[in-house]
Image: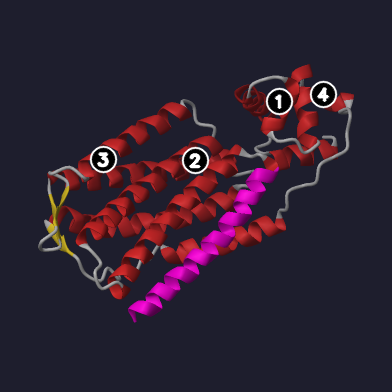
Amino acid sequence: MEHLQIAYDLFVIMIGLAALSIVVFWAAKTGEADLRDFSLLYVCFTLVLVVMVLKKYLFLNVEDYSARIWYLLSGAEQILGFAVIIAAIHFFTGVYRVRYRRAITIAFLVLMLVCSLLLFSPSGARLAADTATIHFGIAYKLVSLSYFATFTCMLALGYGLIRRAWQTERRSFLIGLLVFATVGYLETTLHLPKALRETSARLSNEGGFLVSSIPYALYGAFLIVYFLQHPAPPALKMDALPEAFLTKYNITDREREIILKVVQGKSNADIARELFISLATVKTHLHNIYRKIDVDSRYDLLARVRSGQ
């Protein structure tokens, strides 16, 4: 039965890797920062599944599977779970154009670093190698509460500001992610009392079924279909933009140059190099362009230029 579950987990991971490959390709093709941030989020959760499967496999198939490796992998799983939440917060603040995004992300990263240090501290999760037991202290409970509070903030942010992207093509993309996150949140909520109550854990077959792997697999399948149906638009051969288009949206000369580079298929790095400006300046101009034209991505910008509206 345990090997069947490992086979299931590997199948889920394969779906996730296929979806991730398409997202990374699309992000590289379009240069979209939001898709790059989403790729980071998806990588983190995929790594959580990989670590879980690795722990199961080692226990079932490696005779001298040491308690120290188990301890380190368990800690890595906890930290990666935290990283998933931070990556989701960073992604949502980017999609929703939240002010002070960088400060918010840094604040949660600092919290994650502190929790990671507490987790491996003597008052966190301490390994008794002779009995293959991890003893949990008060710091472990504080980390569990911090993780739950951060997860709550992420979900509130995702649902609370979704109206900002409701009229865009990203709507179904975001709803799928929020459903996936909600299942994970409910799973975390059910496990929180146990995490706060237990004082130790022994090395054993950690074959617990991760319920959120189901929406993860379904969302991975959705991403594959979504991006296959929304291929990156080909570059346009244009040397000038319609004057009516420039006037309608009050486009500056520098913004006009950047739009032309975008429709010609140039990446942000290419634009920065060819116009002799910094990458940050390119991103700032693109943000202003998106705001003026009322679009959210390169895909939408190219569609608007094509239509001439």
Q: Amino acid at mark 1?
A: Arg
Secondary structure of the residue carrying tag 4 is helix
- Where 286 sits versus 124, above or below? above
Left or right of 146, for residue 103: right
Q: Of tags 3 and 4, which is closer to the observer?
A: 3
Q: Nearer the viewer, residue 85 or 6?
A: 6
Q: Is residue 4 magenta?
A: yes
Amino acid type at circle 4 is Leu
- Earlier in the chain: of badge 2 and badge 4, it is 2
- The Cα atoms of the two marked residues, 4 and 1, are separated by 24 Å
- Residue 19 highlighted magenta (yes or no): yes
Q: Is residue 80 left or right of residue 274?
A: left
Which of the labelled discs sits on residue 273, or is there none?
A: 1
Q: Considering only vertical position in the picture, is 164 above or below 221?
A: above
Q: Residues within 10 Å of mark 4 (few under 14, many from 20)?
A: some
Tags 3 and 4 in contact by the CB under 8 Å rule? Answer: no
| Front one among 230 and 43 | 43
What amino acid is found at the position of numbered circle 3 in the picture? Cys
What is the residue that sits farthest to the bottom in this orientation?
1
